[in-house]
Each structure stands twice: as structure tokens, then as C-alpha cells.
Amino acid sequence: MTKRPERIADKIAEKLRSAIVGGRLRPGDALPSERELAEQYDVNRSSIREAMGRLETWGLVKIRHGGATRVSDFLMGAGLELLPHLVELGGKVDPAILEDLHSLRGMLLGWCAEMAARKADAGDVEKLEGLVRQLSDPKAKSSALQVLDYDFYQELVRISGNRVLGLFTNVVREVYLKGPDGFASLYGRDVFDPSHHRVAVAAIRARDGAKAGAAMRAHAATALRTREETT
């Protein structure tokens, strides 16, 4: 059975995406012509056109009919769907992007905890306290603690009521939990110590947004500090 043209186009687009995200093709670089790419990948030109269309949709190239297709500055034009591919360059987690991601997560954790102090009801606080109890289990493995830690973050996002942030969190969770071994550099001593979570929940119950936010930012800083100590 012959492969469908769209599957071929997907594979070509993915290869070119890796080259662009990995820096082998840089912003402003001209891609080979349709004819040259068709010869390189041993496919027809319609498959190349479909692949170029995907790359343009992802914000990776700019197609100019009658002119060269050039690589775009994807950090300025691409969307969140590129994040999983940006983090896992060459099958490995990019340390610089990882640090960016966790710095952003720290800011969001603090903001969500502050919002939770304003909006959480008794049931919300009970859910957070339940997650803290699970994080406090001395027998829990790092892989389980990783999931629980992110569950805690997602619960804060849910309480905040910010739907756009919820969508962003879904994307980050996919990246964060898809390949947990790639994040091993973050899992040093005290990374999953639930003391910050416990302080945050107590502050949320007391409607103390400043204290709750500070506790969650301190928790995020623990992971970043661990990475700095191991590099």
C-alpha cells in the first residue's frame, strides 16, 4: 500500500521543523526550491508544497510566491504548539528553554496562589490540602511526586478561573510529563519538599495572598536553584 501524500508531507515538515528549531536553519535563511526539495526527499512537488504550508502555519517560514521561502524568527511568530519541539531539541531537553519555562512557571505559580487566596472556597482548600498530604508521603517516588506537584499547580490554575492560562497549562503539562527523565536535573534534594505548598495552602485558607504567592515562588525557585547547582 502506498503512503498517502499528507503523511509524506508531515514527515518532511517535521524534519524541516527540527532543522529550524535546532538552529541548523536560521531566521532569514532561504530554503531550497520546491524542485530541489522534491529531489532531496524523492517525492513529488505537491508533497513539498503541503509541507511548506504546514511550516508556514506553525510560524516557521514565510512563503513568497515567485521568490524564495525563508525561515522566520519563530520566537516572534510561532504559537504554543511549538513548545514541545522547542524543549526537546534532538531528543534532549534544552537547558536554556527549561530554565525559561520554569522561570515563567514560578511567576504563574505565585500569581495563581494569590488569586486562590481571593477565590478559593472550602472545597478548593480541601483539595489542595489533600495534594499536600500525598506530596508528604515519604514512600512516594520522584515520578509520582512530579505528577502531584503539577496537579497542585493545575488546581491553583483552576481556582484562578483564568481559562487562557488553563490552556497554556495543558501545553506545559504535556511537555513536563511527556519525558520525565529529561527533567532529572531539576529533581535534586528538597525539590519536592512540600513545606512551601503547606505554607501556601494555610495562607490561602487565611486569605493571605501575599504569603501564598511568596511560598509558591519560593517553591519554583528551589527547582531552578537545584539546576544551577548541578550545572
Image (cartoon, grey):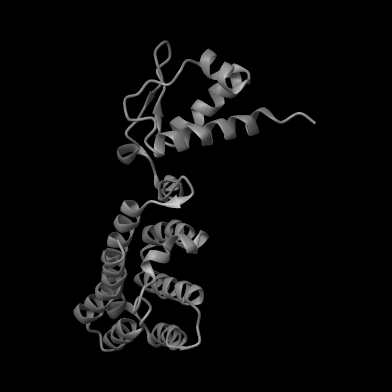
The percent position of residue 204, horizontal first and vertical second, equals 29, 84
Seen in the image, is 196 located left or right of residue 3? left
Above or below for 189 versus 157:
below
Estimate the x, y position of residue 81 in percent, counting from the top left: 45, 47
**Residue displayed at 32% across by 69% down:** 223
Q: Position of residue 54 (x, y in %)?
A: 50, 32
Which quarter of the figure is the N terminus placed in?
top right
At 44% from the left and 34% from the top, the residue drawn is 19
For image coordinates 45% across by 59% down, the residue present is 182
Residue 27 image position (x, y, % from top left): 32, 29
Q: Is residue 31 above or below residue 212?
A: above
Residue at position x 31%, y 52% from top? Answer: 96
Place residue 119 in its image quadrant: bottom left
Residue found farthest to the left: 210
Direction from residue 91 to residue 11 in the image, left or right:
right
- Residue lying at the far right in this picture: please name it: 1
Q: How many marks?
A: 0
Figure check: 186 above or below 209: above
Q: Quadrant of residue 190?
A: bottom left
Depth order, front residue of 109/21:
21
Give the position of the C terminus as an image quadrant: bottom left
Residue 171, picture quadrant: bottom left
The one nearer the camera, 170 or 231, is 231
Query: Which residue, as the protein is rendered here, is positioned at the far top?
Result: 66
